[in-house]
Each structure stands twice: as structure tokens, then as C-alpha cells.
Image (cartoon, coloured by chain):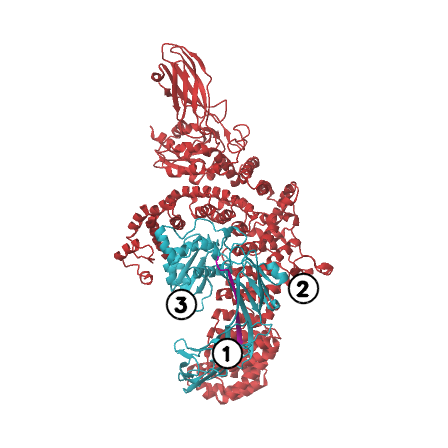
Amino acid sequence: MSNTTSYNNDKVVTGEVEYAASDPASGAFFQPDYKKNDDLKLMLDGSKDTLKLEAMKRIIGMIAKGRDASDLFPAVVKNVVSKNIEVKKLVYVYLVRYAEEQQDLALLSISTFQRALKDPNQLIRASALRVLSSIRVPMIVPIVMLAIRDSASDMSPYVRKTAAHAIPKLYSLDPDQKEELVSILDKLLSDKAPLVVGSAAMAFTEVCGDRMSLIHRSYRKLCSLLADVDEWGQLALLNVLTVYAKTCFPDPNSETYSSDSDTDKPFYESEDSSGGRGGGGRGGGSTPSLDPDHRLLLRAAKPLLQSRNSGVVMAVAQLFYHCGPVQELPPVAKAMVRLLRAPIEVQSVVLNSIASLTVTKRSLFEPFLKSFFVRNSDPTHIKLLKLEILTNLATEASAGVVLREFQTYVGSSDRAFAAATIHAIGRLAVNTPHETETCLNGLLHLLSSKDEWVVCEAVVVVKRVVGGGAASARAAVARAAKLLRADRLATQARAAAVWLVAEHGAAHPRAAAILAHMAMHFADQEELVKLQVVSLAVKLSVTQPATLPVCRYVLSLARYDVSYDVRDRARLLRRFVEPAPGKQLPAYAAQIFCPDKPKPTVESSFKERGQYTVGTLSQYLGLTAAGYRALPPAPRTPAAAHLRTPPDEHAPDAHAERGRADQTKDKSFYSEPESSGSGSSSSSSSGSSSSGESSEGEESPDEKKKEEKPVAETNNYSRSSHSGTSDSESDSASSSSSATESDEGSDESAEETPPKNSADKKVINEKSKPKQEVQQKKNEKSNLELLLELDEVASTLPTMTPTCGGFLSPPAAPPSVGIGDVDSITPVGPSLCPGVSAELFPRVVSGGLAATRRWSRAPHLYSHRMCAIEITFTNHSAQDVQHIRVNKKTLTGSRAIHDFSPVPGLAPGASASATLGVDFADSIQPIEFTIISSLGEVSVSVTPPVGELMRAVTMSETRWDLEHKKLRGMTECDKKATKLDDEQTICKRVFETANVAAITATGDFLRFAGRMMSSQDLVLISVKIESECSRVVANCSNMAIASLLANEVAQAFARS
Amino acid sequence: MYARIFFEERDVFLEKHWRSVIPRSVCDYYLEAQRASPNDVPPILAAPHHYLISIQRGGVALVAVCKQEVTPLFVIEFLHRVVDTFQDYFSDCTETIIKENYVVVYELLDEMLDNGFPLATESNILKELIKPPNILRTIANTVTGKSNVSSTLPSGQLSNVPWRRSGVKYANNEAYFDVVEEVDAIIDKSGATVSAEIQGYIDCCIKLSGMPDLTLTFVNPRLFDDVSFHPCVRFKRWESERILSFIPPDGSFRLMSYHIGSQSVVAIPIYVRHNLTLRSNGDQGRLDLTVGPKQTMGRTLENVALEICMPKCVLNCCLTANQGKYSYDPVSKVLLWDIGRIELPKLPNIRGTVSVATGADTSGANPSINVHFTIPQLAVSGLRVSRLDMYGAKYKPFKGVKYITKAGKFHIRM
């Protein structure tokens, strides 16, 4: 049924619709119906899982067929929360396919994934990360980044593997994240689980394939894990290690190595088979020792030649060919020959590689000559490759065998193959002087073939061969003469033979005889032959003047020929033979007819493929594919081995040493780690020179960071591996330490690297999350309701890590505003103090006492996290009110109230003010408390406007831009607002709404900045004045704040 | 590393995208190449901005499109693994079957490849993630509302033996080993051996409970020229002791494949005496073939079949065979002679006339014979398994070894 319905897309079969809908098991693969989308929507909106599943299956069918199903996006995306795992899976598939086209709607699903990222089931965690990172929506970059960072230190190796997979995805989505991703990658590369390492190697190749400094530390571990990694990982890992070995170890085949290759062979064999290093004194003396690390890699890789995966075998071959000593190549060749039993496609690739290897390393494959014999059943391209290899392999000794094979091939019914064989024979003739005679004989024989094709090819080839040397020319002419005499040749072949005599028979004694013979039978020849005979006659008359009479005779015959071509030719050429008086033509006849023609070159077409790495796409195609990276040239001296010493083998101070080493390493190998591609070639040449180059100035902060980063991470790694249970603890500790660390780092320069930033953010976020939870329930008017859910999800994080004592108490002692903070973000006083006060409680409630409150925007003395609220009490009653104070406080989370000092007494009509400090924990949830006095108790609630939860800070404009860039994506909230013409008015409105400071107060783009009271998150507001309206953008890593703030500012603008 | 995979059979019928969406038109390059020469499509094609890497199996072609430098064998090997998996799941991989099971196909592809990098390709793991469809389960699922998709991570994925799932239980514990040897040979006109090799496999079907650790020893392991193993085989022990030590995957798999190369002498178990004369002057040609056993070590040849691709000029054949049936397809010019078992002393013979197109060129035609045969209970290389030991489990399994020799690429040039 599917066969018939699948191709008639234009036909609308209404009957089938119901059928498909009612029968989920039917093979309703490609229902050609566009209207049906409506009922698909209905099915998806319904509550029945079976219907949903059926609908999803049909949608997947549409995708599989390549039809557009994007209009169903809203209906599908809702089901991302479905409990049915299969529905969920299919929704994921759909989402990944269409998210890029429907970015806004795709955001609706993000919170589900975030929740799933915390699921106790590792499979669900991993699949959530997979899908989340596959959704190509630039808005969610920070979220994915966070997710990757968390998952990279997950307990489950499977999740860590998924994190490694996610790294290149994020990199391709936003290349700016490179540095941070690299730091995660560094961690994953030093993972101990084989499952993770392979994927990490893959990510490494894609993200920063030339940054070998990352490998040093884990090199030995990677080598030892190689055998345990899954086959695809092995492939990726081998590719990475090949580049590494090429970068760090000198070429084993240069200088001393080649001299004693004969004695080496048994030594290496025995060493490898015994698996140990007990090569004995004999070997130790005679072999120049390979760097032990280099040897380690080769030894680890060698068993993989036995892999069932041809890709892995090829990768090992690549390693040995480019980095191994030449004596160890024979087993590699053997393994490659084994692959010839694999499917055609594999054969094709392997033969291609062998073909280019045989150009330079013929001896390697010589023993396997017979494996390359062609079978009739091979496809043409395989035949051609085998032919190429056979030709490359033929030596004096084996030429006979090969030639005999070629003879069989020439008769093949496959024309292209037969033609190629003729060419191959030609090459063989040139390459093996012994066999030239035999080859030529064979070729000339082919000239008499009935097949035009064969003849044409043979002529071309003979011409080439003959161009090779005088001896062969003689033989050829003799052979041609014999054939001509016998008159057995076909027309074209005869013409070719005559041409051959004309071209090369100048000095040949029999040439004249042939001419005479041909002249005798001139009239019987075909036109093609006649033309050649005329040429022959003229040429001979130049070189052998004795033949002049015959030449004249031929010309006169030609003059009266029936063919006008022949007549014309004769007329033209006669001028050379019978000179008119005063003409100079005959003087130049020799130059015209017998010039030195360049010799045709005969070489393998695979010669230039040798420049590409073995087994790559580029090598197969013979051209540089996009993204091809050549192997770097081997260094003269080996890179210092201590770089590869794993850190935990040494005392703690080894870190410092390694850090230093890293630094010099970077300089000598990759003078510019950021530049990809060209870096590798330029680097190794600089060798061991360690002096700083001109670029040192701008690089130093970078290097410094590099020096610090690995230290922090290894700490983390070793700690978590020791303690085991308290993974999360060490994690948070390390991230906090890196946060402080990078704060220091930024002393030096104004620019901050992303890693620091997000580490910083993370710590802060974690602290603030529990508090935000409370806040959520209230935000109803926000347009980003759904997104706000994110925070709620994120807030479950601490429950995952119960041992985290340091979470809520500020571990990264937020560089307490004003004093410790030197990163040029400095708090300033409020730009405007709102004079408006609001009623706290009216006098009616308490029987005479009234209170108003005002946001003073002054820092509270007790804690910098508290907002100061100025409360003014007025006694409207007739009696004294005594002892006004705060009584009951209902607080949630980390909120706190610092009581005002009690007002001892208030005379009637008098008023007094007090300052209350409230830590709102960055939430606009109201706080409730009661104020008690002699008149009784009044309960009060204060709802802070979002603008009061922050404090004004100032910074440079560039810094602002930089911070702004980091807070893109989902942490940004954008609002259209009424246009206000005056910048001052704008500033005023903004200041009224929020406690921020202006960074730029003039121009079309106004910048404001503040800091959240509790979390110290930066809050950035910008107002862009456009022609029609103005645009308010608020950024804050706490998205709820950003969205509220943007709303309020926009509302403030609307107020006039 | 790939952007997408297409499945096609004359036209694209299924597509899946990774990384980014590429228009389907990119496949035209492949289709064009296929149209030009259906049996000779190079596995790698370079389109202007993409590279198409393709395989063909069972009438279905899988085309992977990638944008960048990639290890071609990596892609090819993976595509083959995809087909293997489908065959494992659906018992075959054809257009109809893929279309019928497109949802499972999609789910499988999703598990197998993440962003162009293989994720889970072990069939044991996949089967735990996504249950293979069968009628019973389909009914059960519709009744109970369960799905084929598992919600937990297969245990094998995380262990050091990712190829085996845990908690395997069988009532009858069995382990079968098939030693299959294929003879590849080229025999020339005069009957001399041009090249001969043996390609061997050991295929297992192992149904053992728990986590058995098996050791397989050979009588004459020195025979092996070159070997390749399933990842489960411990290479160290092979290197030092020449025994196969492994924890097997559950079910059928290929334990090892080996090669006995052109250096050692290979016994050729069959000979064909042939005589084909074609004349270009319009007369009838003659064909005479006789098949006989040779060096079979006392075993009989079974399933013998000869396949001759006749020269283009041959119009028809009129033959009589003293054993078996023959057929000639005038379009593809293939003469097939199915002989069956060769019982001595009678030698199978076929003879008769061949009609040749008048005036056709017959000189260059030299067809070749593809020979098929099997010899049961014989490993032509002389390989023998000496014993199989099991550790790590208490029960006594039933063990069996079967030897069989087949013709691989066995060509006789005429």
C-alpha cells in the first residue's frame, strides 16, 4: 500500500484520512493530504495518548518524506511535557528539526528540558541535554552553556558524554563561547571514563583541533584508554593523537633511524609481541630510542589494527604512516589489505589510499601483489584503482606477472578499463626497461585490434613510450615496419604505424624500404593512411635525402588523388620538396618537420595525493576539501616529556611547574592559540625559543589565566574523584574559587573572559534561586510568564546537592560593594531620590496613628543587601502613642528585616521617622510584618517596586557594552515604549522607576546600570530612541527582574 | 560529521537531518551518477558545497551529505552499521520495510547519531532502548498503552562490556560456532591458479545466562595470516597465547574474521574444463563445460552453480546439461547453470550451440565464470577448534562447532 500512496502527493484521498486516524498500526506512511493538518492538531490537543502518538507518527512521516510540517509547531510543542515517553521522543525529533524556524515558540519548551536536566534518571537527563543543545536558537545560548557546564560534572558518564557532544553544537551556534567551551573540554578530556573520552576527542577536533596544549596533561591516560573506547571514539581519538604525535615528536624516520633499519626489525617485533620493554641489551644499543611517550602511543594503537571497523584500521594506518618508524609499517599494510574483503565502498577508499601510498612506499605492498588482481565482477572504479596499484607495484621481478595479467585485462569488455590497461602497459614499459620490448610488442599488436578505442589508446601510449628513449624507438619502428609489410593492420592502426615510422624512423635503415613499399600500394590505401604516407615521404626526404625521388613520386601520386584533402596536403608539402627560386622554406624544413618534441611524462596520477593525510576525504578526492587540516611538520626536537606528566603523580607544587611549562609550551608551539589553522604551521618552526615575542604584551593576561585555570580544574577533578560522594561540593567550591580568581585576573585588564563571567553568575544564581521561587507566584502580568518558569526549575538545583553548606552563605564573598570591588564597576549614590511617599497604613486602621513610607535609596547601615525604607509616623489621635516598634515578621527564604529603632513616644500631631532595612532577596513579593504601639497592632505589607531592589552603579561605556553582550539571549527583555523627545525626561523617568545610574545620558542610545541588592547581579537598562517610538531593553541574569523592569520603565514612559 | 542521510531507491524516500537542514536537491548529484552507471557509483562524490558519501545495499542506497572534511571510512562504516541494524530489527532492509517502519527507523537513527557523531551502535544496547517491532508486542502495546521506547538507560552502555546486556537468562544454555571459510581464487585459461586466498569467519550464536567468560582454543592457530576481532576479544591474550578469550555479546555476532593470504598454498576444490568457440562469420558457436571435484579431502561439493557473463555478441544458447538446470538471460547475457551436488563418478557436463549475432566482433571477448559451491564439514585451510572453556558461570552449556567452506570470489577466466 505504501508503495502506491507514497508518490501521488497531489491526490487528496479523503477516505483514507479517517482510516489512518483510526488505525495506528497501519502503514500510513505518506498520506498525501494537506488539509489533514487540522485533524492532526485536534489529535494533538486531545488528552488521549494513543491519539497523540498516532498524530506524532504521522508528522514524523511528513518530516521523513521531506514535507513541511512547520505549521503544526504550536500544537506539537505543547506535548513536550507528555508523560508518554514515545510521544516525547517524537516531539523531540520534531523540535530539533523545526526549532530553528520557529524560534519564539521553541522557547516554550525550554523549561521542560531544564526540568528534565535535573531528573534522577540519567537517560532522561542526557536526552534533555541532547535536545536542548540541538535546538538552534541563539536566545538560549546562556542556558545551554549552563547546562553543559553542569552536565560535564555529572555523576553519570553517559551524561558527561552527551555534554561532550553538546560542545560542538553550541560552538557552531555561537563561536564566541569558544574559550569557555574549551575549558569544559579540557575537563572532559581528563575524564577517566572511556565512554566520555572518545566523544571529548571528537569535540576537541571540532572546536579547537589545533590546541595541542590541552592534550599534554591527559596524553598518557588517553593512550592507555584507547583500547577501551568504543570504535567511533577510537577513530576520533586516533585522529587527535596523530596530530599530537606529529606536533610533539620528531620524525622517527629522519637521520639516524634509517641507517640501522635492518637490525631494528627483529627488535621491534620481539618487543611488540612480548608487550614489555625487555628488548634486551642488543636492541638498546643499536636502536635510537623512540621517545617513550611516542612508543606508548604506537604500542597502544597497534592492536587496533585488528579492529573490525575499517575506519579504525585506517586511522591506525594513518598514525603509523605519518608518525611511526618505517620498519613498523608491514603489519599495517597487511591490515589494509585485509580491508579489501569489506564492502565495495570500503574497498574503494582503501584502494585509493593504497594507490597513493604505493607511489612512495612500493615495497610495503609488494608481497600482496596478487591481492590486487582484478576480477571481472569488480565495478569499474575499483578495477581502475587496482590497475593503478598493480602498475605502481610492478618491479623488474614482478613485471612479467603483471604484464600477463594486463594482457587478460586488455580484452575486457569494459572499455574504460581496457583503455586504462593500455595506459598502464605504457607506464610499465617506461618504468621497467627490461620489459619495454615486450610491452611495445604487445602495444603494437593492439594497433591491429578491430576496436577503434583500443587502437586510439594504443597509439597514444606507444607515442609516449617511444618518446622515452632511442632504443625503444628503434624497436617500435622495426615492429611497425614488420606489421606494415604484412599488411595486416586496420586503417587507423596502419596510419598510426606510418606516423610512428615518420616520427622516429629518421635514422632507421628500414624506413626507406617502408616508404617504397607504401608508395607502391599508395593507390589502394585509405585516405587516412595516404595523408600519413605523404607526411612520411616529406619527412624522410629531409632526413634521408636519398629518398627524394620516392618522395616526389608519392607527391605526384597524391596530386591526382580523388580526395581533396590528400591533394591539398600534397600541394602544401610540395613546396618543401621542390623549392621555387628565391623561397627560403626548404632551409627551414628540418626545423619544421623534425623539431625536438618534449617528452611526454609518465607518472602516477596519484602522485600529488601523497600530500594529503592518509585516509582523509581530501586524499580520496585529490583536492583539498573544506575544513581539511594538514598535519603539522614534525618538530626537530621532542617536546619536553614533563608536560605529559599527569599532575597527581607529583607534589602539589607541580601545578605551578606545569603551569609554567604550559606557558612556554604555548609560546613555542602555538604562538597564538586563538588563531586556528595557520597557527600550527608557524608554531613548530619557532622551536625551543622561549623568549617572548612582540605579542607578549597583549597575550600576558591570557596566559596568566591559562596558568590558573588548569590548576583550579585539576583540583576539582582530583578532589571529586577522591571523595566520590560529595561531587557537588567540590564543584561549587571550584567554581567559586574560579570566580574569585578571575576577579583578580580582571584587575589587569578591562576585558573579561566568558568563563569567569558565567562561573560568577552561576554562584550568584544559585544563591538567589530559592528566593526567587517565592516571587514567581505573583508575576502574572509579565509577557514572559512561561519563561519565568525557568527560575522555578533552576531553583530545584540545591536539592540536588544537599551537602552544599556554602550555598547560601556567600562563599564568593561578593566583592563587597564599594571596597573590594576594583573592577571599575563602582557604586554611586542614587541619581534621584523620589520624594513621593506612599501610605503604609492609614490612621483609621490603628485608631489614630498613620504611617507613610518612602524609598530613600540610601544604603542601609546594617547590611548592604538591605533596602532602606523611611517610615514616617504621624500621630493623628488625641493621645500620646508610645513605643512604636516592629513586632511580628513573617519572612520566607533568606529575606530579612532589620527593625527600626523603636520610637519611644509620639505626641498628638507630632511625627517621627524611622528607617527600616529590608532584604527583599531580589523578589517583589511583599513582605509582611506588624507594627505595634500603645494603640494596638497593625499588620503592614510592603511591596517593593522592582526598581528599588537595585543600587546604582557606574562603569565605563565599553565595560557596559561588554557586560551587555554577556547578558544577551533570554536574559534580555525588550519593550516598546512611547517616544519621549527629551533625553533628560527619559533619564528622569528611568530614575523615577529604578535606582540606576546613567552611563550615557545623551545621544540616541542611553545606558543605565545598577546592581541587584542581594545577588549583586548587574542590571543594565538601555533606551534606544527610534523614529516612531523608543525601545527599552533591560538585561539581568535574573530574567524575572529584567522583564519586570522593562515593563515598568515602559509604563513610566507612557505616563505623561 | 554528516549533515543528513537520505535513503533512496531511484528517488529519495526518507530523509533525516542533523546539524542543519540541507535541501533535497543536493541528492541530484548522486542520482545523476547512479543514472549514468547504476553499478559503478563512486562512494564519494563532490558536489559544489557538499560531499556525498553513499553506500548501496539491498537495492537501497544511503547517502550521507557532509559539508566538511571527514574520514570517509568513518561515514561508510557507520552507514553499513545502520543497514546492519535495520536488518537486525526488521530482518531485511528494503524500501518497503523502511517505509512501513519509518517511526522505528527514525527513533533508531536518532539514537544512533547525535549531531553527526555515533552515539549507540551496539545492537544489544539499541534493542534495550527501542524494542524491535513484532506482532505480539504491537498488540500488547495497543492494549496496554506501553511503547517500544525504554525509559531507562541500558546497563551495558555504562559498563566495560557495552556489547552485553545484564541479566540474561536462558533455560537452555547453548553456544554455537560456525567456522566459515570462503575461497577467493582466480584461475586462468589453462587451469593454473593465478591467485588464491582464504577468507574465514567465525560466527557465533551464543545464548548463555549471566556473564560467561569464554575461551576458544585452536589446534593450529599458526595458520592465521591476519585477523580482526569483535571488540569483545581480549587482544593481549591473543598476542601472547593465541587463544580467544572473551565475554560474548548476547545472540548472534561475528567473533573474528581471518585471512589466509596468497603466500600460503590454498587447495582449490573444484575444476572446470571449458571450451567456448565463437565465430564471427555468423555460424553457431559451441560451448562445452565439464565440472569436477579436486582436492576436496573426501567431501562432496554441494550447491554448485556456474555463472557466465557471455560476450555481448551472443544472442542465445541452446544447451543440454546432463545434470541440473540452466538458464540464459539474453538481456543481461548471463548464463546460469545450477548443478547442485556433484556425485562421483558422474561429472556434470553441459554442451550445445551458441548463436552469435552476424558480423559481430568476437575476437576480444573473453568471458569469465563465477563459481559457487559449498563443502560442508570442512574448513579448507585445515583450521580446527580444539576446545571451548567457560568461566564465570556454574551451568554446563551445550557447545557446537560447525565447519563449512564456500566459494567466495571464485573466478575462472575463459
Whole-angstrom CA distance, mark 2 to mark 1, is: 40 Å
Quarter of the image where one finds residue A991: top left
Q: Name the residue carrying label 1.
A: B413
Give the answer, above or below, for where A5 lies relative to B278: above
Residue B186 is one of the magenta-drawn residues = yes
* Quarter of the figure with the N terminus of chain A: bottom left
Secondary structure under the numbered disc 2 in the rendered image: helix
Kindly report which numbered mark, 1 or 3, lies closer to the viewer in this rendering. 1
Secondary structure under the numbered disc 1 in the rendered image: strand
Chain B shown in which color? cyan
Chain colored red: A
Residue B376 is one of the magenta-drawn residues = no
Badge 1 local density, few (<14 within 10 Å), some, or many (20+)? some
Q: Main secondary structure of the magenta part?
A: strand
- Same chain shared by disc 2 and disc 3: no
Give the answer, above or below, for where B80 lies relative to A773: below
Q: Name the residue carrying label 3.
A: B35
